[in-house]
Image: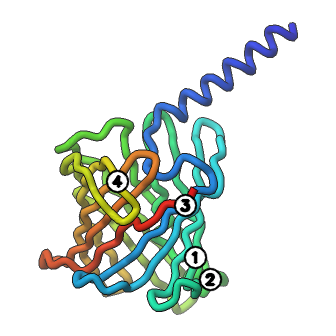
């Protein structure tokens, strides 16, 4: 009976491990790893910086959950923290998911803690194998806030996601083999609409290496790139 029990445990562990291994992740795979990013405008002027540190990897049901602490710093002082958020990524089956909750600022949402808040998300996902020309599923988040006379809504839609190419990308953090992706982002807050086009380079077991943002006229407005990896 004991042998059968141990055999069942081994089978369960093997199955859980294989589920996680089918998924290709685009974040660090070792707890404690820190990614340091620098944000600049189109002329190279530093606007700010942030870090992402992998806090934990946990199995929950048929999913593997990755939690990262994102710390945003003032562009004029690396010691001044503007904001900290925990963002979540998931592996389920052979797909890697980015929770759209990261587009919702927890600090700003504290102002609505006494109101009724409803959040509807359709998370971004990446299949195990990417290839140039491949189209990816859209993602979205809608936050509806009701508080008596004050009703508001925030919506962010990410569409036209496509794998453009496989390229090498060099940054101050090193040289990386990447997938080049493109996507359109539309955010709406009340009557205010903002449309952007993003191009990004992502690398397996690391994450975003570089991203470029363009306005609706196709003009480059900002660059974010990985400048250091701390393990």
The quarter holding residue 197 reads bottom left
Percent x, y of residue 78: 53, 84
Q: Disc 4 marks which residue? A: 202
| Position of residue 88 in the picture relative to residue 183 (left or right) | right
Quick one: 42 or 133, which is closer to the camera?
A: 42
Quick one: 16 or 180, which is closer to the camera?
A: 180
Q: Count residues near mark 3 (Cα–Cα under 10 Å), then give few for <14, some for 14-19, many for 20+.
A: few
Q: Secondary structure at mark 4?
A: strand
Q: Secondary structure at mark 3?
A: strand
Q: Nearer the viewer, mark 3 or mark 1?
A: 3
Q: Secondary structure at mark 1?
A: helix
Percent x, y of residue 120: 48, 63
The reply to whether discs 4 and 1 touch (Cβ–Cβ < 8 Å) is no
Percent x, y of residue 50: 49, 74
Mark 3 to mark 4 CA distance (whole Å): 18 Å
Q: Disc 3 marks which residue? A: 230
Q: Count residues near mark 1 (Cα–Cα under 10 Å), then give few for <14, some for 14-19, many for 20+.
A: some
Q: Disc 1 marks which residue? A: 106
Asked whether residue 73 appears in the rendered view, the answer is yes
| Position of residue 94 in the picture relative to residue 80 (left or right) | left
Mark 4 to mark 1 CA distance (whole Å): 26 Å
């Amino acid at each position: 009976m004991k042998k059968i029990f141990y055999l069942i445990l081994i089978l369960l562990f093997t199955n859980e491990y294989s589920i996680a291994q089918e998924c290709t992740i685009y974040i660090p795979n070792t707890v404690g790893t820190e990614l340091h990013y620098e944000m600049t405008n189109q002329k190279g002027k530093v606007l700010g910086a942030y870090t992402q540190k992998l806090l934990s990897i946990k199995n929950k049901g048929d999913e593997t959950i990755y939690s990262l602490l994102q710390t945003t710093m003032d562009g004029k002082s690396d010691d001044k923290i503007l904001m900290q958020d925990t963002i979540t990524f998931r592996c389920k089956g052979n797909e890697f998911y980015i929770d759209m909750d990261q587009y919702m600022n927890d600090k700003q949402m504290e102002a609505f803690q006494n109101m009724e808040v409803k959040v509807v998300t359709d998370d971004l996902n990446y299949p195990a194998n990417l290839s140039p020309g491949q189209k990816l599923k859209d993602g979205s988040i809608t936050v509806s806030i009701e508080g008596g006379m004050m009703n508001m809504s925030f919506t962010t839609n990410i569409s036209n996601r496509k794998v453009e190419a496989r390229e090498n990308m060099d940054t101050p953090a090193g040289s990386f083999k990447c997938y080049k992706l493109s996507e359109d982002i539309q955010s709406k807050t009340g009557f205010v609409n903002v449309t952007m086009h993003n191009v990004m380079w992502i690398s397996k077991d690391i994450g975003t290496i570089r991203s470029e943002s363009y306005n609706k006229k196709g003009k480059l407005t900002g660059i974010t790139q990985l400048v250091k990896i701390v393990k």
